[in-house]
Amino acid sequence: TTRPTATIALADSRLTAGETTAVTITFSEPVTGLDASDIVCPNGTLSTPTANTERTVWTATFTPTANVSAGANTIRVNLSGVRDDAGNAGTGSASSDNYSVDTRPADTTGPTATITLADSALTAGKTTTVTITFSEPVNGLDPSDIVSPGGTLSPPTANAERTVWTATFTPTA
């Protein structure tokens, strides 16, 4: 009358581009019926699980999805899809420990920037908005990073994506 339970383990819990890892699903007793439709594996695919001769340990290969960065993932097995030799179906689900996937291409280039001024002909008492548009998100931009002869620049503020920064330029009197 005991229903089967399971534990799930990944050989590698930090997956990067080009890697795969073995997934081992260990059941409390021999089971039948485990197939890919019983398994949810975010940010990747799992090969068809194969059982050892006792049908207590099932293994498969997890291949992470390309161009993904996801730090919180677990593989889940729907236990109602398996039955023990007495015909008892499992209940609920079993989950692996957390694994991360980072298969984005390596960033090997620094950011580039384009600077525009709302007004390029300033007179006494006037200011202008300076917009700095970066090719990718950046952090830590402050006035000391920017040479602004003939005036001062306010601390730049970023948009939510950190790709467009704006500041106010005040010319020297």
Image (cartoon, rainbow, N blue to C red):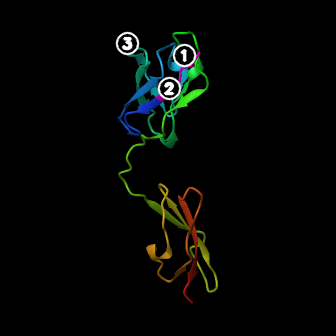
Residue drawn 44% across the image and 35% down it: 66
Q: x%, y% of residue 91?
A: 61, 22
Image mark count: 3
Residue type beneath disc 2: Ala
Residue type beneath disc 3: Thr
Q: Earlier in the sequence, mark 1 or mark 2?
A: 2
Q: In terms of secondary structure, where does tag 1 sit? A: loop
Q: x%, y% of residue 142?
A: 50, 72
Residue at the far top in the pictured view: 86
Asked if residue 4 is among those painted magenta in the image, a careful observer would answer yes
Residue that badge 3 annotates: 53
Residue that badge 1 annotates: 82
Left or right, 114 with respect to 125, comes to left
Residue drawn 58% across the image and 81% down it: 170
Q: Earlier in the sequence, mark 2 or mark 3?
A: 2
Mark 1: few, some, or many residues within 10 Å (few <14, many ≥20)?
Answer: many
Alpha-carbon distance for marks 1 and 2?
A: 10 Å
Left or right, 160 with respect to 22, comes to right
Q: Which residues are magenta?
A: 1-7
Residue drawn 53% across the image and 58% down it: 163
In this rendering, the answer to whether 144 lies above or below 4 is: below
Q: x%, y% of residue 167?
A: 57, 72
Alpha-carbon distance for marks 3 and 1?
A: 16 Å
Q: In terms of secondary structure, where does tag 2 sit? A: strand
Alpha-carbon distance for marks 2 and 3?
A: 17 Å
Q: Nearer the viewer, residue 58 or 145?
A: 58
Mark 3: few, some, or many residues within 10 Å (few <14, many ≥20)?
Answer: few
Quadrant of the frame with the C terminus: bottom right
Residue that badge 2 annotates: 6
Mark 2: few, some, or many residues within 10 Å (few <14, many ≥20)?
Answer: many
Q: What main secondary structure does the magenta stretch of the protein show?
A: loop
